[in-house]
Image (tube, helix red, strand yellow):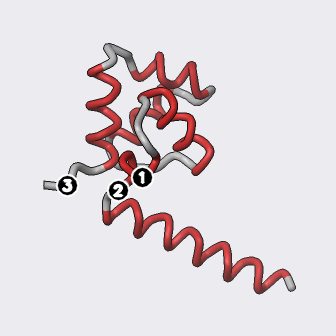
């Protein structure tokens, strides 16, 4: 079974005995933001994903390897490409 990003994040955090607030403080985001990630309501940007992978000593690939999350980033990239076409 493939574990989703929210579940991986929560598992990594609890294994290291860290609170959502601990992670939020390290990443300079709110605790509510971390909660949103763990509940699948939102996802961190690429720079934060790299920081999260560093905190938990896990590759970004292992952290995000989830079809739903990959689809989310593919859609974001598509939106960015469409926006850049409009600007030119």
In the image, is 26 to the left or to the right of 23?
right
Q: Residue at x 76, y 78 (%)?
A: 84
Residue topped by disc 3: 2
Question: Closest to the observer: 73 or 58?
Answer: 58
Label 2 crowd bin: few (<14), some (14–19), many (20+), radius 10 Å: some
Disc nearest the viewer among 3 and 1: 1
Label 3 crowd bin: few (<14), some (14–19), many (20+), radius 10 Å: few
Residue topped by disc 1: 61
Q: Which residue is outermost to the right?
A: 88
Label 1 crowd bin: few (<14), some (14–19), many (20+), radius 10 Å: few
For the residue labelled by badge 3, is the local secondary structure a helix, a strand or a loop?
A: loop
Residue topped by disc 2: 65
Classify the position of the N terminus by image quarter.
Answer: bottom left
Q: Earlier in the sequence, mark 2 or mark 3?
A: 3
Q: Position of residue 82 (x, y in %)?
A: 67, 82
Marks 2 and 3 sit apart, C-alpha to C-alpha, by 8 Å
Q: Residue at x 27, y 51 (%)?
A: 4
């Amino acid at each position: 079974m493939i574990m989703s990003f929210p579940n991986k994040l929560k598992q990594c955090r609890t294994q290291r005995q860290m609170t959502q607030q601990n992670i939020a403080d390290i990443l300079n985001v709110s605790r509510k933001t971390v909660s949103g990630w763990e509940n699948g309501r939102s996802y961190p940007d690429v720079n934060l994903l790299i920081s999260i992978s560093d905190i938990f000593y896990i590759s970004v690939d292992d952290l995000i390897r989830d079809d739903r999350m990959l689809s989310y980033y593919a859609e974001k990239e598509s939106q960015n490409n469409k926006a850049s076409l409009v600007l030119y």
